[in-house]
Image (cartoon, helix red, strand yellow):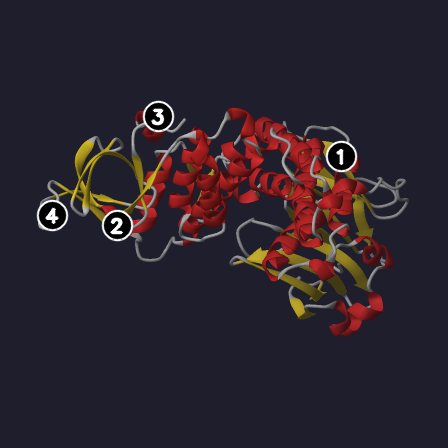
Amino acid sequence: MPATLAAVTLAAMAIVTQDSAQLRAAARDSAQQQALLWQGDSLEIRGEKGDFLQVYDHRRERAGYVRASYVRRISLTNADAPELLAVVRFLKDSPGGEALGIAYTAAYLKAAAADAINAEPFDALGTMAERLARRASNRQGKAVDPALAAHLEVVANYGIKMTGYEHDGRIQLCYDGEAFRRALALRPEPKQQARAALALTRQECLDPDQRPAERYALDQWRAEVLDKVALRDLPPHIANRVHMRSAAVWSALAFAKARRGEPSQEAAERALDELGSVSKIDLTEDDVSAYADAGVRAGAMRWAAQAVPAASTGLHVVAKPGQPGETCVSLHAQTGPALATRCTFGLVWTASARANAQGSALALAVQPMAAWRELWVFQKRAGAWSVDVLPPAAIDPDVGYAEFAGWVPGADKMLVAREARVDGKFKRSFELLSMETLTVDTWADRPDAVRLFSRWQDPAWRKLTVSLR
């Protein structure tokens, strides 16, 4: 039970409905201001004088007078519970009214009989808390909003916990999800269940400093929560959101399993299946970015879903353990010693190795992070072998992949598909690269717009890539 409501259990109570309401020392507007009150603040009513109420603010431990028009009187008896719930239903979908809605939800939970409380008030509580956290996160870099900061303080008084995580140089404020967990325990309706599952599995609300073992356990729990959602009872656009989130979670699990030396093929296949289950015609405008994110994450892990082919008799790679946690890749011809060697702490997908017909170059997928896959290019220059790394984008590692898409015979060219998040936006490109410098000769956002790409793309790449989704 929130501390404020516990303190005024059966006393006459009021909830502040306006921001910057003044708590004054006497029942007149000219009296000294004791404090500024905000939407959602709860007050104990101790008397009435003219147009003012005599109140006590338990949060600030201060008494005073407030204009009666700035507050709404409420009762916490069981008979008043339906009226309180009606207000909660109205405020649940009212942006800017989160603090007030949370105050009314807390009042309802106090007034209603225990056996009458279902998932609805907790769903509303979580929805409003999450929306408030998003509003606060989106305000970064803008002028300070005193009301928003005050609303965060108000809801904290009702037990709403927020945590900030740093991502890409900005702070993401996240609700801890306690109300959604309670909703899931009370047999929620399908939409309520989906809302709770999506809120509790947000990628941007994962602690970036979490240890690998802790993240692995959390990802397993996230997958279980999403698996329990009754998809058949949901509107297509909401089912899409569950599929997209599941694709991201299962790709993370596949990476973690591979890192731990456990079989990862099933998890990677599940990620690709979830991505393939998204109905593109039912995607909303708000979900386009989430679909791109899910595609990149699942695409980065797609080689985990492929079985390792039989050893090649021509140009091929061999991966062996190096220093603790390290894998060393050596390039070999049909016979003789290694032509080139390079070590990495990433995952080496030997099934991805593709050599050109001349035996002078080989492309290999290497994945240092769960959502970041690079392309290693072994090639022979002036009689000596070298290894170059082609990243998904010319930025710090974030989310993206670069993959081999074909060789152009006799032209010293290579086809590459890249997809990455750059400055918060996703970019997909199909490129023709010069092997000599690995610079882009030409590119487009679809393969048929690059002439040689349309003609020489690798059939296996076209069959397996998610970049053409």
236 vs 37, left or right, is right
**Cα–Cα gap, marks 2 and 1:** 62 Å
Residue 6: numbered disc: 3
Q: CA distance from mark 4 to mark 1?
A: 71 Å
Q: Mark 3 is on which residue type?
A: Ala
Q: Position of residue 276 (x, y in %)?
A: 77, 51
Q: Earlier in the sequence, mark 3 or mark 1?
A: 3
Q: Residues within 10 Å of mark 3 (few under 14, many from 20)?
A: few
Find residue 166 and report its horizontal and vertical position in percent: 44, 43
Question: What distance separates the C-alpha of mark 3 from that of mark 2?
Answer: 24 Å
Q: Is tag 4's residue or tag 1's residue first in the polypeptide sequence?
A: 4
For badge 2, the amino acid type reads Ser
| Disc 4 residue type (three-letter) | Arg
Q: Is residue 409 above or below residue 343?
A: below
- Dot placed on the residue nearer the N-terminal end, 3 or 2: 3
In the image, which is nearer the foreground, mark 4 or mark 1? 4
Marks 4 and 3, the one that precedes in the sequence: 3
- Residue neighbourhood size for the residue with mark 1, other residues' Cα within 10 Å, grouped as few (<14), some (14–19), many (≥20): many
Nearest the viewer among 288 and 11 is 11
> In the figure, is residue 139 to the left or right of 8?
right
